[in-house]
Image (cartoon, grey):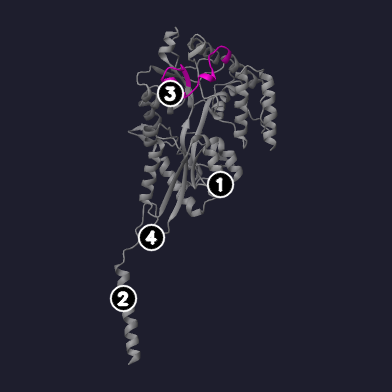
């Protein structure tokens, strides 16, 4: 009797389990092939806090999380001035981001620290690294290569510099608008900038030419193309800095001449775009990111764009080239890296949003409204065509694990030269400082 009761209970339990299994819903698959019942994967995503980019990032995060219910992305952003240091500090403390923005100049330091992973092409719908590279503008990923591998999933901001000038200011000074089909010389620019400076008594009310003189990356972005036009390179083939080379002396002498002619004056500088929009400067250097803000700041301002100047005796035509890009941490688990690359794929596929809402030029090729990406960009403002033509002559910044130390040294040398100190003496001091920095 007891055995019959026990058997009946066991059969009832089995039957109940079978019924339960039939009625429970199956875990739903997602676009990324991850099921909603899978363990949660948490990613930390860090960027600098350029205001227009934040809502775009937030929208893309929401889209990715909707298609990957088991993924949770924490978005952290920091002021541009100390963003890279925040990233490095986070990694040093064991809390580095899984996905992050950074400038191309950081790649040597990231590689030396072992904190960036080579790209996973499969996350981008291709099988090989060569196929992945073909998704982007030729040469745009060059700064992110090492030992035959690519260490980015794509560029978030792809830039060059051209000369932006106030047309009315030139006309008032009796100067014709600048040509678009060829660059003027730096020598011509010096004369024009001096003529555009306006003074009331001893006070400069409008400076001819301006850039952010105290920001080290701007020192490199403005002066390195000049150095290369003269046939120089900051870093020798042996990997050492050379501040006393003939080309560097020529560039720094030129800057000193600009200052003596009152074509430039660091004391007049407050904000690059605001100063230009408000008439406190007549010419600036800028990239495609400058166009939309200037139109907003002063819709009535009559301005145009000319190619970046070249020295009359330039060895070759060289312009600025720099990029911010998306990286995935080599310190993250394989599961996190896989999802992180899928997230980067989505980030780089939003070319329209990055341009229309932020003003960021993308290097990943696509067509929008039936137009190639560059054509689509240019049709929003014809002046952009001049900037895009300058990309063809662009070279990325020097490569060094001591980028910040060397760019700081260069900026301090610039300040002393603009203050009137002897150029060669300043550069000899800079060389000694650079050699000490490399020895650390």
Is residue 150 in view? Answer: no
- The residue located at (43%, 46%) in the rendering is 343
- The residue located at (37%, 24%) in the rendering is 295
Of marks 3 and 1, the one in the foreground: 3
Whole-number angstrom distance, CA of label 4 to CA of label 1: 31 Å
Q: Are marks 2 and 1 in contact (CB under 8 Å)?
A: no
Q: Which residue bears the numbered disc 4?
A: 37
Along the line of sight, the residue nearer the viewer: 28 or 71: 71
Provide the secondary structure element on which disc 4 rests: loop
Residue 434 left/right relative to 365: right
Residue 374 image point, x, y percent: 40, 29
Q: Is residue 429 magenta?
A: no
Q: Which residue bears the numbered disc 1?
A: 91
Provide the secondary structure element on which disc 3 rests: helix
Q: Of callouts 3 and 2, which one flags the residue occurring earlier in the amino acid sequence?
A: 2
Residue 191 image point, x, y percent: 53, 11
Q: Which residue bears the numbered disc 2?
A: 16
Quick one: label 4, few (<14), some, or many (20+) residues within 10 Å? Answer: few
Q: Which residue bears the numbered disc 3?
A: 274
Residue 72 image point, x, y percent: 41, 51
Q: Quadrant of the N terminus?
A: bottom left
Provide the secondary structure element on which disc 1 rests: helix
Of marks 2 and 1, the one in the foreground: 1
Q: Which residues are magenta?
A: 259-284
């Amino acid at each position: 009797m007891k055995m019959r009761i026990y058997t009946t209970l066991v059969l009832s339990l089995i039957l109940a389990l079978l019924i339960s299994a039939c009625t429970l819903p199956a875990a739903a698959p997602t676009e990324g092939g991850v099921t909603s019942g899978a363990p949660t994967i948490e990613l930390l995503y860090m960027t600098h806090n350029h205001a227009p980019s934040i809502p775009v990032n937030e929208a893309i995060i929401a889209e990715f999380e909707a298609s990957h219910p088991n993924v949770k992305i924490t978005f952290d952003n920091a002021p541009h001035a100390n963003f890279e240091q925040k990233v490095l500090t986070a990694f040093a403390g064991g809390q580095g981001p899984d996905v992050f923005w950074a400038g191309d100049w950081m790649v040597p330091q990231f590689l030396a620290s072992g904190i960036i992973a080579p790209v996973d092409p499969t996350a981008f719908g291709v099988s090989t690294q060569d196929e992945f590279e073909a998704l982007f503008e030729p040469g745009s990923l060059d700064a992110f290569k090492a030992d035959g591998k690519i260490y980015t999933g794509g560029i978030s901001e792809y830039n060059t510099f051209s000369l932006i000038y106030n047309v009315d200011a030139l006309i008032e000074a009796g100067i014709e608008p600048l040509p678009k089909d060829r660059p003027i010389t730096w020598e011509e620019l010096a004369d024009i900038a001096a003529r555009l400076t306006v003074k009331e008594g001893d006070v400069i009310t409008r400076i001819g030419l301006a850039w952010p003189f105290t920001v080290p990356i701007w020192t490199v972005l403005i002066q390195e193309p000049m150095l290369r036009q003269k046939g120089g390179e900051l870093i020798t083939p042996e990997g050492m800095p050379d501040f006393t080379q003939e080309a560097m002396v020529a560039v720094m002498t030129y800057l000193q001449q600009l200052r003596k002619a009152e074509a430039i004056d660091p004391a007049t500088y407050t904000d690059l775009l605001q100063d230009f929009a408000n008439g406190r400067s007549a010419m600036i250097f800028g990239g495609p990111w400058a166009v939309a803000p200037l139109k907003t700041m002063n819709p009535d301002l009559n301005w145009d764009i000319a190619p970046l100047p070249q020295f009359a005796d330039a060895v070759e035509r060289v312009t600025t080239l720099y990029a911010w890009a998306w990286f995935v941490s080599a310190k993250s688990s394989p599961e996190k890296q896989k999802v992180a690359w899928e997230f980067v794929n989505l980030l780089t596929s939003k070319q329209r949003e990055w341009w229309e809402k932020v003003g960021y030029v993308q290097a990943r090729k696509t067509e929008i409204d039936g137009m190639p990406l560059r054509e689509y960009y240019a049709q929003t403002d014809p002046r952009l065509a001049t900037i895009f033509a300058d990309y063809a002559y662009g070279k990325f910044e020097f490569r060094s694990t001591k980028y910040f130390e060397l760019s700081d040294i260069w900026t301090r040398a610039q300040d002393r030269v603009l203050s009137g100190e002897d150029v060669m003496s300043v550069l000899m001091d800079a060389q000694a400082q650079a050699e000490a920095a490399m020895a650390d």
